[in-house]
Image (cartoon, rainbow, N blue to C red):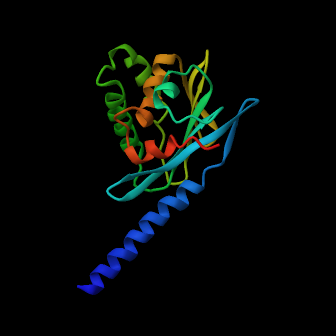
């Protein structure tokens, strides 16, 4: 019995330290065109106690208010670094579908065409180590970049609010990741 507790503690330590190490792997800033964006916060998306990806929110200025971030019509980005071989293209698209439902409270009809276009940005195989940048540029829309290559552009502020809401809304993909992204580092 004592041996089981020991191994449980060791396993939990490694799971937790893996999340912390993964979160530290994201850069402190991203440069979008000529504009630097600062890492507002980052953390791990976990499922069944396993890290799936590390996500970071990048803003011009630190901000801890999710409502203000979602409403803002300004340059911002979310970086997702895949850290598990369990993340597949099919699972990512399913998670995106669920994320839009949660982010919009099921009110996706007005942006269904945009959601379809966004899903196409994730049509290729996804492997451990892939990096996705989801960048909102005012007047242009949401750009999806995979490993430095543009996958697509989806226009609209309302769509941006739904996409960023996948991680920042009241019903996020992962509540711990939401809290981590909203740290507002200075």
Q: With respect to residue 65, does 177 lie above or below?
A: below
* Quadrant location of the N terminus in the rendered image: bottom left
User: How many labels were placed on the picture?
Assistant: 0
- Where residue 145 sits: x, y (%)? 59, 35
Q: In which quarter of the image is residue 148?
A: top right
- Please indicate whether residue 117 sits to the left or right of residue 40 in the image: left
Q: With respect to residue 119, does 174 lie above or below?
A: below
**Which residue corresponds to the image point at 34% horizontal and 32% vertical from the top-left?**
97
* Quadrant location of the C terminus in the rendered image: top right
- Where residue 71 sits: x, y (%)? 50, 21
Q: With respect to residue 182, does 24 lie above or below?
A: below
Spot the residue most to the right: 34
Q: Quadrant of residue 3?
A: bottom left
Spot the residue most to the left: 1
- Where residue 74 sits: x, y (%)? 61, 22
- Where residue 64 sits: x, y (%)? 52, 36
- Please indicate whether residue 28 sits to the left or right of residue 63 in the image: right
**Which residue corresponds to the image point at 34% horizontal and 79% vertical from the top-left?**
7
Q: In which quarter of the image is residue 141?
A: top right
Pick the front one: 59 or 137: 59
- Please indicate whether residue 96 sits to the left or right of residue 19 in the image: left
**Which residue corresponds to the image point at 39% horizontal and 76% vertical from the top-left?**
10
Pick the front one: 156 or 121: 156
Pick the front one: 184 or 19: 184
């Amino acid at each position: 019995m004592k041996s089981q507790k020991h191994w449980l503690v060791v396993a939990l330590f490694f799971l937790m330290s893996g999340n912390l190490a993964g979160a530290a792997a994201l850069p402190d800033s991203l440069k979008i065109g000529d504009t630097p964006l600062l890492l507002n916060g980052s953390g791990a998306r976990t499922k069944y106690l396993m890290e799936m990806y590390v996500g970071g929110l990048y803003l011009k200025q630190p901000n801890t208010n999710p409502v203000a971030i979602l409403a803002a019509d300004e340059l911002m980005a979310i970086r997702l670094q895949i850290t598990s071989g369990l993340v597949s293209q099919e699972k990512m698209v399913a998670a995106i579908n669920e994320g839009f439902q949660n982010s919009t409270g099921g009110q996706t009809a007005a942006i269904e065409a945009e959601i379809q276009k966004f899903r196409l940005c994730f049509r290729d195989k996804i492997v451990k180590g892939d990096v996705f940048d989801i960048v909102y540029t005012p007047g242009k829309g949401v750009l999806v970049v995979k490993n430095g290559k543009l996958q697509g552009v989806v226009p609209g502020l309302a769509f941006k609010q739904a996409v960023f809401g996948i991680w920042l809304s009241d019903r996020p993909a992962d509540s711990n990741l939401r809290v981590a992204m909203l740290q507002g580092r200075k």
